[in-house]
Image (cartoon, rainbow, N blue to C red):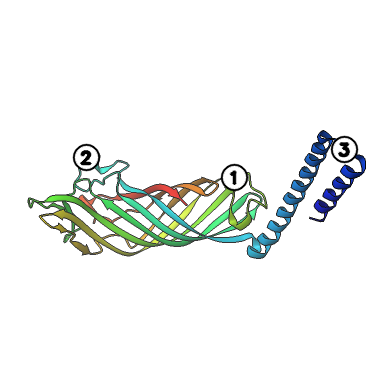
Amino acid sequence: MQTKIILILLLFVNMVAFGQTDSELKEEMKEVRKEINRELRDAEYEISKKVFTKRRPGETYFSMYFDLGLNNYLEDGNFPDRFGAPYAVKPFGSWNVAIQGLNTTRIIGKTYLQWGGGLTWYNFKWEDASQRIERGDEGVIFTEFNEPVDHIKSKLTVAYLDVRLIPMIQFGENQRMRKYGKSKGFRIGAGPYAGYRLGSHSKAVYNDGNRQKPKNRDSFYLENFRYGVRLQAGFRSWDVFFNYDMNPLFAPGRGPGNADLNAFSFGITF
């Protein structure tokens, strides 16, 4: 700022003392603006370093992230609707939602570790809205609700408490870009996650003259633990992700038709 004031004063003195022409004055004004812009950039960089060091000790920062995507599952590498199974999932509308509190720690160079946890919800909406999932003696069973009603939707919701550990490589970033934990470069990473089931319920929505929403809270032989691999990539404030559960959704031999169903999800993170 002191340099800015001095340059303006010198410019004024030159103009008065030597009677500069308009063109000469414009050229000098351009030089003054360039110098001011350089000083502002340098000052911003120095401030960002101080803020980053103060608020991000150990080059670790904390942020809240939200996943919004779709989920489905595979049976022996195929979608169940290929076999016309009653438990086939509707491709659109089976939402996957997650709220995560994550730390990002710089390891070395462009390598970072994203770690933390939060809550994740699977919503499996059946392709056939008249299907109902129930807990049988040997496993879950699907039955068709044959009453003459307008079937709107039928689904299973499962909530998990999750933890994840994702090594990341970030490109095209520097100290100023990392201010407040933001990066303007491309990043990509993959790593494990694990979750513990907090609760589950089925819900049907149909219209029989009145809108009905029966809900059934049950474990449905769901595995209490899940674990898998997450792949994510992003640019600036957005990421895309893909999660794949390595273990089956239901306990062995307890899935519909004794099927082993591996859940997966994909979507965006913001």
Residue type, numbered disc 3? Gln
| Dot 2 or dot 1, earlier in sequence | 2
| Dot 2 or dot 3, earlier in sequence | 3
Could you tell me which secondary element the residue under label 3 belongs to? loop
Q: Using the numbered discs, state the Cα–Cα distance from disc 2 to disc 3 in whole angstroms.
A: 86 Å
Q: Using the numbered discs, state the Cα–Cα distance from disc 3 to disc 1 in whole angstroms.
A: 46 Å
Residue type, numbered disc 1? Gly
For label 2, the crowd category at 10 Å Cα-Cα, with few meaning under 14, some 14 to 19 and many 20 or more, is few
Residue 83 badge = 2
Residue tagged 1: 185
Contact between labelled residues 1 and 3, with CB atoms less than 8 Å apart: no
Residue 8 badge = none
Q: Residue at x 18, y 49 (%)?
A: 129
Left or right position of 160 against 148: right
Residue type, numbered disc 2? Phe
- Residue 96: x percent and y percent? 36, 52
Q: Residue at x 40, y 57 (%)?
A: 98
